[in-house]
Amino acid sequence: MTITIDDFKKLDIRLGTVKEASKIEGTDRLVKLVIDFGTETRQIVSGIAPYYPDLSVLVGKQMPAILNLEPRRIKGEESQGMVLYAVQSAIEGHKEGEERLTTLSPDEPLENGSVIR
């Protein structure tokens, strides 16, 4: 499926800094992230717990998120966006179907709320 450049321009993707990261009780995958986007702080729920056993490594990281998604309740928590990650499937030397996931971060710190284009 392809989209037009005008469709892409509808996405509000901004850079933010993770202030808090905590596991959502009663789930294996879900993490609640509190992210500072400069003019506002948002809570985003993400299924990344299996990839980050030590959530403290996420605190202080800058990462992009889509901010103009409709808010959604997930396991009783409101998610106000979607964090973007790079995912690699079927890694050589790993079990079939095992994935690797990593945050996307700028080469150098930028102002929170910087637009991703």
Image (spheres, helix red, strand yellow):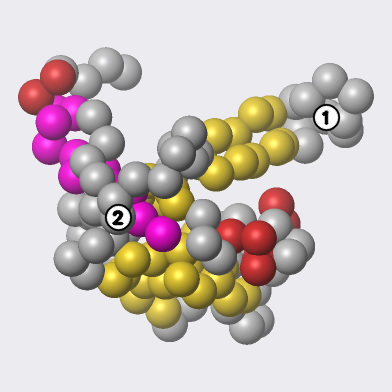
Provide the secondary structure element on which disc 1 rests.
Answer: loop
- Dot 1: within a 10 Å radius of its alpha carbon, few (fewer than 14), some, or many (20 or more) residues? few
Q: Name above or below for residue 47 compared with residue 30.
A: above
Quarter in which the C terminus is drawn: top left
Q: Residue 96: give x, y in percent of width and height.
A: 83, 29
Q: CA distance from mark 2 to mark 1?
A: 38 Å
The residue lying at 41 percent from left, 59 percent from top is 17
Q: Residue 69: give x, y in percent of width and height.
A: 23, 54
Observer-nearest residue: 44 or 2? 44
Quarter in which the N terminus is drawn: top left
Q: Residue 8: give x, y in percent of width and height.
A: 19, 28
Q: Which residues are magenta?
A: 7-17
In the displayed structure image, the side of residue 34 where residue 91 appears, left or right: right
Camera sees residue 82: no
Provide the secondary structure element on which disc 2 rests.
Answer: loop
- Residue linked to disc 1: 96
Q: Residue 23: give x, y in percent of width and height.
A: 62, 75
Q: Name above or below for residue 110 compared with residue 36.
A: above
Camera sees residue 65: yes
The residue under label 2 is which amino acid type?
Asn
Observer-nearest residue: 104 or 11? 104
Q: In which quarter of the view is residue 44 placed?
A: bottom left
In the displayed structure image, the side of residue 61 where residue 116 appears, left or right: left
- Residue linked to disc 2: 112
Q: In which quarter of the view is residue 13 placed?
A: top left
The residue lying at 75 percent from left, 25 percent from top is 90
Q: Which mark is residue 65?
A: none
Residue 18 in magenta? no
Q: Name above or below for residue 67 compared with residue 5.
A: below
Q: In which quarter of the view is residue 73 placed?
A: bottom left
- Dot 2: within a 10 Å radius of its alpha carbon, few (fewer than 14), some, or many (20 or more) residues? some
